[in-house]
Amino acid sequence: MDASRRQFLERAALAAALGLSGPPSLSSGEARAQTRAAGPPQVADLHLVNGRFHTMDSGTRVVSQVWIRNGRFAGVGNNVSTQGNPRRVDLRGRTVIPGIVDAHNHIVLVGNRPGWSTPLEHVFTIQDCVAALKARANGVPAGEMVTCIGPLAAMQFPENRLPNLTELDAVPRPVYLQAAQGGNRTNSEGKKWLEARGVMVAADGTVAGQGAGMALLTLRKELLTAETRKRSAADALQYYSTLGITTHRDSGAFQADAPAPGIASENTYTMHEPFLALMREGRLAARLRLDFLHQDPPNANPPLPTLSDRLKNSFPFFGNDWIRTGGIGEFTGGGLDGLRAIARAGWRGEDHSLSLQNATQLIAARETVNKEIPIGNLRWIISHIPAFTPELADRANALGVGVLVGWGPTRTGTNVGPPYRMLMGHPIKKAFHSDGGDITVINPWLNFSTMVTGKNLQGQAILGDQVLTRQETLWLATAATKWFIWEDDLGSIEVGNHADLAVLDRDYFKVPEDEIKRVRSMMTVVGGKVVHDEL
Ligand SMILES: [Zn+2]
């Protein structure tokens, strides 16, 4: 099978899994790009009319038309005059938002999953989950493994469990599911496949205890090749384009030289290659911003064994509009000396915080370093902050440190944070991140639903009084991310900005609260290129 035929079938299989009526066809721009060795794809100019464009500009304007020329917005308003001969698309009153920027997730891990990787964050019943897997199986050769490793949570289903072996037996291929939260399951064909390789599976399809790591390790050893990684990477970006994400900021993985059992482990020196290959072929469905995670122990001898080489041999904020490097994160490693080295090199650094004590320590360490080497212009980041106080926000803000918030829909408990309402009233820089891919879901609408309703995927109230309006929530995931991506021409629909947008299937601003999680994109545009089209 030649490469383009294979690619067509893969796209068709993914489209079927997503429940689309047909495979997304290659735009002429894409087709042209594929014949070239490198360079950005050529795209047709667009005139989108009769929409409700929530521009997220500083005046929160809502307009009805945009003109896109050479990949950027050339006109934004209610009566836009165009030049040349742009393709005119009547949006028939649909709501349009700037492309969503997930300012910290683990999309590169999701793009390196073994098997026919099938993200399942858009289904809310076990029946729909199995149907999506069956649709995917139609495009998968007999005997080959359909997987979902990471982008799925048991909490998506009322039963709060994954489909069991009997239910998964409706899928005519071996299946292996390993949820970000909620364990793992396989079906009878998958059980046979795993047991033939020494991984024991319980009668209900669960691979218990250490076995889960063994299952993933075995799948990685047997099924990962440069080609299958590229397929997973393309499918992951394509999948999230159907949910309106146009920029992912990847926050790394745990370093593993060889295939490893951990869901968050990959070879961090080679895991970007499938995405770089897609970029060269003009096939990226979203922009990627890449940070480098380091975990050198403090007081290592020699000091900072991996971080010092990274800072000497790599370039921060280097690349093009599709893929660009960022800073060090979401771990900096090396204790205070790691922070000092990053500050001295003039890089951005990010660490995550899981508790108030943790956040307090991180800020104290940055205050210490800042007295020696000013970090105020480097846009350092602390992510997650489930617990945070106005006093800590004052101190972080005084240092020029911003915070990323999100990671909510699969959390349980009461008042689990982050304190969105407090932060919205504070001048500190803040934006949305899902942190999804290995510990939770990426789907922004699941996150937005929690931020607006205060409820997790099981409908339990988890945020207390710290909820946001829909406008505030969308602002955090669009215009507010500019500071974190460190690019002013993303995140809002304004003349001169990259033409990144999503035409929604329903009006996010008006649908009942319990429908927010079901919002999808009907058409997603990245740099003027239509990467997803169900219109
Ligand atoms: Zn993370």
Image (cartoon, rainbow, N blue to C red):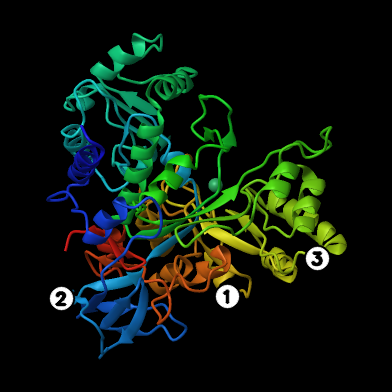
Q: Secondary structure at mark 3?
A: loop
Taking 325 as reference, is 509 left or right?
Answer: left
Give the residue type at disc 1: Gly
Q: Is residue 445 above or below residue 70?
A: above
Give the residue type at disc 3: Pro
Residue 386 visible from this viewpoint: yes
Which residue does the numbered mark 3 point to in the structure image? Answer: 374
**Can you tell which of label 3 and label 1 is closer to the viewer?**
3
- Cβ–Cβ below 8 Å for labels 3 and 2? no
Q: Residue at x 34, y 8 (%)?
A: 196
Q: Residues within 10 Å of mark 2 (few under 14, many from 20)?
A: few
- Residue 425 has which mark? 1
Q: Secondary structure at mark 2?
A: loop
- Residue 238 has which mark? none
- Residue 92 has which mark? 2
Taking 113 as reference, is 427 left or right?
Answer: right
Q: Residue furthest right?
A: 372
Q: Quadrant of residue 382?
A: bottom right
Q: Is residue 265 above or below residue 120?
A: above
Q: CA distance from mark 1 to mark 2?
A: 36 Å
Taking 206 as reference, is 477 left or right?
Answer: right
Q: Residue furthest front?
A: 36
List x then y, in percent, for residue 341. Answer: 79, 51
Taking 307 as reference, is 230 left or right?
Answer: left
Mark 1 or mark 2: whose residue is earlier in sequence:
2
Q: CA distance from mark 3 to mark 2?
A: 52 Å
Q: Quadrant of residue 70?
A: bottom left
Q: Residue at x 74, y 71 (%)?
A: 398
Give the residue type at disc 2: Arg
Mark 3 or mark 2: whose residue is earlier in sequence:
2
- Cβ–Cβ below 8 Å for labels 3 and 1? no
Mark 3 or mark 1: whose residue is earlier in sequence:
3
